[in-house]
């Protein structure tokens, strides 16, 4: 499982494999997720 950093509160949180969106559990901000490699998630922007 990969982790990304919330761009709003800076908390790191896990992202499920192949997920297209993810929500920060701390501040509830929703992000679009891309996968540059199969094991590396990246925040693309707000969803």
Image (cartoon, helix red, strand yellow):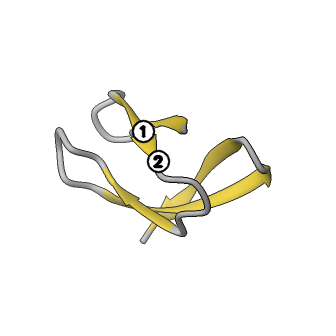
Q: Which of 11 and 41 lies nearest the eye of the viewer?
A: 41
Disc 2 secondary structure class: strand
How crowded pointer 1 is (Cα within 10 Å; few <14, some 14-19, many 20+) is rated as some
- Is 27 placed above or below 18 here? above
Residue 39 image-quadrant placement: top right
Q: Quadrant of the C terminus?
A: bottom left
On screen, residue 34 versus residue 1, left or right, reads right
On screen, residue 18 versus residue 11, left or right, reads right
Q: Residue at x 52, y 60 (%)?
A: 45
What x and y, as percent, mark residue 10? 36, 28
Give the labeled residue for mark 1.
Answer: 14
Disc 1 secondary structure class: strand
What x and y, as percent, mark residue 46? 43, 64
Q: Residue at x 70, y 41 (%)?
A: 40
Dot 2 and dot 1 residues touching (CB under 8 Å)? yes
Q: Quadrant of the N terminus?
A: top right
On screen, residue 47 versus residue 24, left or right, reads right
Give the labeled residue for mark 2.
Answer: 15
């Amino acid at each position: 499982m990969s982790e990304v950093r919330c761009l709003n509160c800076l908390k790191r949180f896990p992202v499920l494999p192949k997920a297209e969106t993810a929500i920060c559990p701390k501040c509830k901000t929703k992000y679009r997720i891309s996968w540059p490699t199969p094991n590396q998630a990246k925040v693309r922007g707000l969803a």
